[in-house]
Structures are given as structure tokens and as C-alpha cells.
Image (cartoon, rainbow, N blue to C red):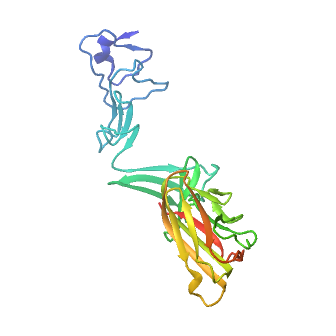
Amino acid sequence: MTRAKDISKILTDADISGNIDVDGVTNLDVVDIDGAFTQDGGAVFNEASADVDFRVESNGNANMLFVDGGNDRVGIGTATPLSKLDVTGGFITVSKDANTAGRVGASEYITGSTANDLIVQATGSTITRFYQSGVNSLNIDAIGAVTKPLQPAFHVKLSSSQTNFAVATTHTISFATEIYDQNADFASNTFTAPVTGKYLLVANMGLLNIDIDATYLFIHIATSNRNYTNIKDFRALDFDATYWSQSVTGIADMDANDTAIVQLRINGGAAQTDLEANEAYTYFSGYLLG
């Protein structure tokens, strides 16, 4: 075994076989090698888990690679990484293998940071795709149009007409047929908010044969926090309303698991009002704005 005290004699233009033992050598803090260094076997740095850092310089950056031993962080371009991996002053390029599932054409995925803006770009493709937990959640196409495949959104209609509504009773409208239900949040006549946010809710009722003697008719969207109501007094009419369309719209503040339903109530007059199943007149829609 070659002792460390002899390093100065042998580390110049020489090949070294075996081990260099530097244990217990006084004042030997740094081994400085000028020129190329080739390691053919495995290498472990800081096997004893000491609170020491590891740094690799490049031609233009003193901290091209920096391992913060005390904070268990890795910096690229920085000696003060703020997270597990902190890339500062540049971009990261990740090229996916051609056989990898989910590949978009010949795309190269580039992510980086400029100031406080995150830049994500897919080259060689007309669509930039964002994934959350491996699921495609946001797309930007070549014209800048943004689509969100999992954004909560629904549009439902009646499966059949509802007839002769009893008066002085609040009725929950039965929307049994879904036109679409993105994210599957509508069931049993009820929309359930999957996350806290502001939701645009729209309901329209195609009503038939409203009695002239009805003192009022209202429809409202009833949410867990408040109701959004449209009310009409039909006593001002000269005859029964054969056709009547009534709608209500609200931007509802909903917490996760809050619900929204559509209700109708008629006071006064005969129980003769019908709700038409035509989807052009009777529907309930919603969309998460943010």
C-alpha cells in the first residue's frame, strides 16, 4: 500500500494501482490533481454522512453542481439550493425515449425558470401538455388555446317531462340525463364541488301552462352556502302562460363537497304547470372558473 506521506512524489504523470491511504496523516487536507483523472470503478463520497459539501466547477460557474451536505439539497448553478433540487440561471432539457408511452410526436420537453415564470415547452409538437400525477391536466395548442381535460364541468337535461307540479311545494328538478360530466361530479340531480372555488352555475326551465292565478313561481339554484333565485308573479297576465322560459345564473362560492341543485316552487293557482324535457329549454350547467 502506498502511504499518503509519499503522495507528492508519485502523483505527477503516474499511474497508481491499489489504495492511497491518507488516514492519520497530519496537515494533508487537500489532494490536488492537475490534469485528467480517470476512475474505472465505483466511487462513494461522504460515506460517513458528515456535514460537508460537494462542489463541481465548470468553466463559467463555480457551483455548476453543488451538494449541500448539511441540508440534504442539490444545487445546479447555485451554492444555496432552496429545495431538494434547485436549478438556477438556466433550463432543464429532458428528451423522452421514442418508445416511452405518452410521447407526443418527436417532442422534447423543456422546463426552466426565468425570474418567477415557469417555462414549459414541447418542441416538435403542436401541443404542450402538462401532467399532474401522471394524468394529462392542461394543454396549450399552437394558437395558444388552453384546454383542461379534467376541469369540473357538466351539462344535464331531463330524461322526460315533469307535469302538473303541486302548488305550495318546493320541487327538486330531476336531471337524469348527462350531456357531459367532465370529472364526474354530477349524480342524483346534484352537483358536488370537488374543490373549493368559484363555480359558474346556469339553469333554464322551459315551463308550460302556468295558471294565471299563480301568485308567484320561482326557480333557484340552491347551494350549500346560498340560493340564486328568479321569481315571477303571474297575476299580471291576462291569460294562462302556455309557454314560459325562466332562467337563473350565479357565480357560486363553493367549498369542496358543497352541493348545488335546481328547485322550483309555485304558490297559488291550479296544479297544472309542466316542465318540458326539450334540452333546448330545460337544462342545468356548471363550470369551475377558478
The residue lying at 61 percent from left, 72 percent from top is: 267
Res 276 → quadrant: bottom right
Query: Does any portion of residue 127 appear in the rendered image?
Result: no
Q: Position of residue 142 (x, y in %)?
A: 52, 69
Residue 230 falls left or right of residue 274: left
Q: Position of residue 13 (x, y in %)?
A: 35, 25
Q: Nearer the viewer, residue 266 or 282?
A: 266
The residue lying at 58 percent from left, 57 percent from top is: 150
Residue 100 falls left or right of residue 82: right
The correct choice, above or below, for 66 with respect to 108 in the image is: above
| Placement of the N terminus among the 4 image quadrants | top left
Q: Position of residue 177 (x, y in %)?
A: 72, 65
Res 247 → quadrant: bottom right
Res 64 → quadrant: top left
The correct choice, above or below, for 207 with respect to 11 in the image is: below
Q: Nearer the viewer, residue 146 or 224?
A: 224
Q: Nearer the viewer, residue 209 or 278?
A: 209
The residue lying at 59 percent from left, 51 percent from top is: 135
Extreme residue in the left direction: 27
The residue lying at 56 percent from left, 62 percent from top is: 222
